[in-house]
Image (cartoon, rainbow, N blue to C red):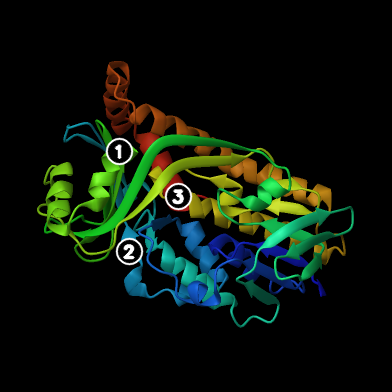
Amino acid sequence: MTTNTDVVIIGAGPAGLCLAKSLADSGLHTIVIERQSENTLSSPAFDGREIALTHHSAQLMHELGIWSHISPDAISPLRDARVFNGSSLFSMDIGHRDTRKAELGYLVSNHLIRKAAYQSVKSVSAVSLRTEVEAINIKTDANNTQITLNNGEIIQAKLLIGADSRFSETRRAMGIAADMHDFGKTMMVCVMEHPISHQHTAWEWFDYGQTLALLPMNGSRSSVVITLAPDEMNPLMKMDEEDFNREVSARFKHRLGAMRLVSTKHAYPLVTVYSKRLIGQRFALIGDAAVGMHPVTAHGFNFGLKGVATLSAEIKAAITASKDFAAHPLLLRYEQKHRRDTRPLFIATHAIAKVYSSNSPPARLFRAGALRLGNRVAPFKRAVAGFLADAH
């Protein structure tokens, strides 16, 4: 069976579904291909990850009709941020008062964003979902792209989008390489309750031998992120709840009191990815398949939404002008703009993560001095705060 459509998106994660929804009013029809079941898309399980959203990202989600599918109780304001180094109580503080906003941004659980994105497209006639299938062959030429699915269906489209994670098989099938850096660390995420208030302030704590993060959720809960070498992480993942509570409280030096686990624990390898090309013949990458950020900023989905907005705007402009919406010059403009939007922060974050995870004596001295200098330079702090709040 052969099906003709305008756009095919491989990957029904938030980036892929957001692009499908963004194109729904363009007159194009989009097919989204996903190997998971529709039940999994409609009710995704908690995966431990909290996503920091800028005001610009929140506005884009409003415009796409996604924000309204997230309960206000599940949206936590991120007012301030503190960066610690080693055992010192000194921190570099980035505050919302350095911006014109009441908060730097918002925190929303990843599984809730996934669910809201699905709900926003499930009844949209311009979007069709193909679930529990995967692409086994991809061909593109000057006029079309052809995707063969493992159920025998062949889909012909004008444009193919890869949105299937930082380990994208679609990117590889299109012969596009990526710069991938494996930090050799494992990141564990879970939700903890604690008696001392987080005051809606995020922590990034570059301790010696470990990196700790705290993302404030509503009430007395926080998303806790611990990054360790795999051999150190394995015992932590296997600990019973009582021992785990004591261990995490001690790792945080009891600064939040006795912490208590209130969720499942999840572990992920710490790997960053930046695709060498973001486009090919009638093909483009979005989301983590294009740029897989270091999670130190919890900022990756903002880049995904940026890419969606940029590519969607180019496609809609081409349609308005009665031009080919998958022409190479159009895709090239998307690639160039998305690189400008993402490359500087990707490089800076990568460098900071490497320096602040090093325990060498020179790195320790540099880390401490850099934080103190950064805390004293008001324009720098305002610039960082402004970026965190308004990145677009």
Residue 231 is tagged as: 1
Q: Is residue 353 left or right of residue 226?
A: right
Residue 82 visible in the displayed image: no
- Secondary structure of the residue carrying tag 3 is loop
**Residue 110: percent from left, percent from top:** 42, 62
**Which of disc 1 and disc 2 is earlier in sequence?**
2
Report the residue marked by disc 3: 299
Residue 80 vertical position relative to residue 318 in the rendered view, above or below: above
Q: Nearer the viewer, residue 11 or 287?
A: 11
Q: CA distance from mark 1 to mark 3?
A: 27 Å
Q: CA distance from mark 2 to mark 1?
A: 33 Å
Q: Residue at x 69, y 61 (%)?
A: 135
Which of the two discs, 1 and 3, sits closer to the camera? 1
- Secondary structure of the residue carrying tag 1 is helix
Q: Nearer the viewer, residue 360 or 91?
A: 360
Report the residue marked by disc 2: 76
Q: Is residue 195 left or right of residue 219?
A: left
Q: Are marks 2 and 1 in contact (CB under 8 Å)?
A: no
Q: Is residue 84 left or right of residue 289?
A: left
Q: Residue at x 55, y 37 (%)?
A: 180
- Secondary structure of the residue carrying tag 2 is strand
Amino acid type shown at disc 3: His
Q: Quadrant of residue 354?
A: top left
- Which residue occupies the extreme front position in the image? 151
**Which of disc 3 and disc 1 is earlier in sequence?**
1
Q: In what quadrant of the picture does the N terminus appear?
A: bottom right
Q: CA distance from mark 3 to mark 2?
A: 15 Å
Residue 42 visible in the displayed image: yes
Amino acid type shown at disc 1: Asp
